[in-house]
Image: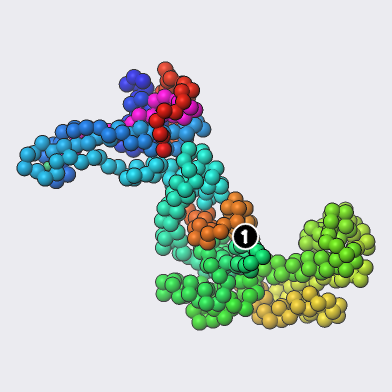
Amino acid sequence: MGQHGSALGSILLGLDGFEVTAAEVIDDEWRLEVQTTATAVGCVACGSQARLHARRTVRIRDLPIGGRPVVLAWRKRVWRCVEPACAARTWTEQTVAIGPRVVLTERARAEACRRVGKDAHAVAAVARDLGVGWATAMRAVRDHGQRLVDDPARLDGVTVLGLDETSFLRATPTAPTRYVTGLVDVEGGRLLDVIADRTARAVTAWLGARPRSWLPGVDTVALDPWRGYASALVAPLGHATVVVDHFHAIKLANTVVDQVRRRTQQATFGHRGRKHDPLYRIRKLLLTVAEQLTGRGRARLGVGLAAGDRFGEVAAAWQGKELLRAVYAAGDLTGARVALDRFYRWCDGVQILELSRLARTVRAWEVEILAWHRTAGCSNGPTEAINLLIAKVKRVGHGFRNFANYRLRRQVADSPHRTIARAPPRAWWRGAVRGTRTTSRRRTDSWS
Ligand SMILES: [Zn+2]
């Protein structure tokens, strides 16, 4: 590659302080020979002009170009001090773009973190695109992610704090289901942190670790109706309004509808729901909000219930769910109070075990449920969006066994990332690598 190609190649590479001296494609990978643009340096110890002593080549992987993995062969300069009295003798050049003893450039490591965190790509997929192993990609996610997570500005401006319990690991024959608590900036729609438990003690410890100035900024706490959370909040967030938000209340009601459907299914047909069972076929329609049901949906619901809900218990549970929704849909506090009484009367009247249990929970959290109408800013949208994100991260991670990795990924997903884009258009690199040798030579050296 000539001078012209080298200049273009360097623009294409876009790595500050580096220039490309040769480029070729081997085994469908770019091999770029690069060096720093520092041709004259002073001695690190005495400052007198240093002389080039030797070159040492290190290989590092960088961001892909045009979908091809890239390997840089960095011909590192070893400098020597010419001053006989100087103690420095020789030293190897260094750069912030490429850390010592790393396999990837810093920008490739940042991009790996962004893709895993923001785009929820699997670590294995990112590793494959960069041409490195899983552990290398994960280390990049951990290093760059930790920096994002540790940034104190992450917690700035939180006025509505959301607490949400999620199952982290499903129960196995030998271990119970493990839960984690997600802490959410409800207004900003950001996940703040994940705690390895759902106990009051765990939440208290987290709140205790916040800067003293942070707690007074929180004026509302939206949470899952889980007693442990409420007791944790009493002391440090005593000034805040505690709210059971729409999303969490309806989640509970939906669980009740599911429970009654399953129990009825089992009692009526003697087995778990299968594809052609009438109740199984309407399981999703039962959880759809009433006003979103189409005419056809309503008709299917009616048919399913007529065929599978002999005692009308599923229909009664569904009605209970809708009555609880009405509490949140009410225009004001008075309307909500009226709707709540209607819900209680319904539950007390139909006497269904699961629904009575739900009514007990609602009574225990009545103040917090009605408080929803006093806090205009407490929408359920962001919490729900974050739940979807969590589900996505969980799916990609194939069920994290390691809580530290899980916590990091969930946090990194909601940290601000810089997008790293290669600026030059495609035509540039075509021109830049004219005369490039494209071979299918077997790998002879060990590219890491
Ligand atoms: Zn010197």
Q: Residue at x 16, y 33 (%)?
A: 51
In the picture, the quarter occupied by the N terminus is top left
Is 51 in front, or is 380?
51
Q: Is residue 302 magenta?
A: no
Q: Is residue 307 rendered to the left or right of residue 409?
A: right
Hey, which quadrant is residue 3 in on the image?
top left
Name the quadrant containing residue 268.
bottom right
Give how far across and how far down residue 52 sits, in percent: 19, 32
Q: Residues within 10 Å of mark 1 (few under 14, many from 20)?
A: some
- Identify the magenta region: 23-42
Q: Residue at x 47, y 21 (%)?
A: 439
Q: SS of the residue at dot 1?
A: helix
> In the rendering, at what x and y percent does residue 59 appear?
36, 36
| Quadrant position of residue 63 | top left
Circle 1 sits on which residue? Answer: 387
**x, y (%) of residue 360?**
73, 80
- Whether ligand 1 has any atom under 8 Å from the Cβ at mark 1 is answered as no
